[in-house]
Amino acid sequence: MSAGSGSRPRPSQWPVPVTAGRGAPRRPCAATVALLGWVLLGLAGPVARAETLTVATYNLENYGAADRMTAAGYRQDYPKPEAEKQALRTVIAGLQADILVLQEVGGRPYLEELRRDLQAGGVDYPHAYLLEAGDPDRHVAVLSRRPFLAVTPLAGLEFAYFGARERVKRGLLAVTVATADGELTIFGLHLKSRFTDRREDPLSAQRRLGEATAIRDAVLGRLPDPSTARFLILGDCNDGKAGPAVQRLLRRGKTEVARWLPAVDARGESWTYAYRKAETYSRVDQILASPGLVASVRGGQARIYDGPGVAEASDHRPVVVTLELGRRP
């Protein structure tokens, strides 16, 4: 947002000394001096307007063709049911996010379908991008009400894994937007699930750690001084705050890369993922803020959205952060 400025006062509007009779002019009163100071400050240059920016992350749970249980039984390559899509649109409307990072989008046609259906309901996201990476079925994408200054799809990030080189399965999506405080970069991710692919790597913990390491290094490669940079790292980490993957995103040696943002819902509960089969609940969806951005995080924390539709739309709940920007001259 561009900085605002008032109209330049005419000379006749400026405060002038008050004289007493025919003698020397009296010293101006304190109020006059203060007013003159504010006028001169206004003439010195514009002050950025304050603004808020709401950013959210949301795993849509297979918004595309997938093997799933339906009312008619088990089906392969079956689309997300219409009732779940309707609930999903209700949730997204309730989020009122300016920028929304998504996981598990089936592909470009599905992203365009979601945008079209949202727009029909009065929720417009004119700017969008979907990252094509190693997972052909579940993509990271972003919807935005604000135009992108830059979009960088990082689909080729690699890490060492059992003597070989592997790629971050769903890549890393970096988008930059303009704000009242300058540029803000959003890094959207979706780390490997806890499904065990190799016996030597139970719950794919080592693979997830390798992905987090590659992502952290890519962030620092673009913004090497997090203490002054403004960025968010957010998405489905398939890991909790104390987990190795999340911890790897927070630091590299003595460098603090980002800070984990606490979040609860309206009832004080902190889970974002419901594993229905085992009836377990955990927080795997995270928002991390660079040290240079933390002061702009409203209340110093994010929040977990639990409004209408969340139980029906997905097995995840969205996490939302509100940034207050441009409040310092």
Image (cartoon, helix red, strand yellow):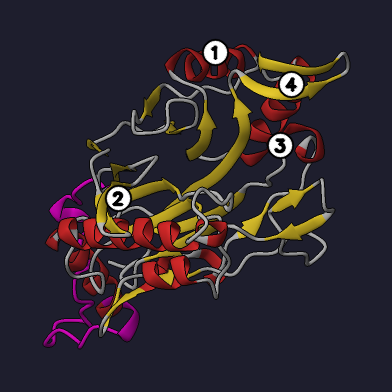
Quick check: is 14 in the magenta stretch?
A: yes
Does 103 sit above or below residue 299?
above
Front of the two marks 2 and 1: 1
Residue at the image position 43 percent from the left and 17 percent from the top: 108
**Distance between the alpha carbons at the discs numbered 3 and 1:** 17 Å
- Coordinates of residue 252 in the picture (x, y in percent): 27, 76
Labels 4 and 3: the sequence-earlier one:
4
Quick check: is 324 in the magenta stretch?
A: no
Labels 2 and 1: the sequence-earlier one:
1
Magenta range is 4-32
Residue at the image position 47 percent from the left and 71 percent from the top: 244
Does 255 sit above or below residue 269?
below
Could you tell me if residue 47 is visible in this image? no
Task: Assign a secondary structure to mark 1.
Answer: helix
Label 4 environment density (alpha carbons within 10 Å; few <14, some 14–19, many ≥20): some
Disc 3 + disc 1, Cβ < 8 Å: no
Residue at the spot of label 1: 113
Labels 3 and 1: the sequence-earlier one:
1
Foreground residue, 247 or 18? 247
Labels 2 and 3: the sequence-earlier one:
2
Residue 185: image tag: 2
Q: Residue furthest front?
A: 199
Residue at the spot of label 4: 86
Disc 2 + disc 1, Cβ < 8 Å: no
The N terminus lies in which quarter of the figure?
Answer: top left
Disc 4 + disc 2, Cβ < 8 Å: no
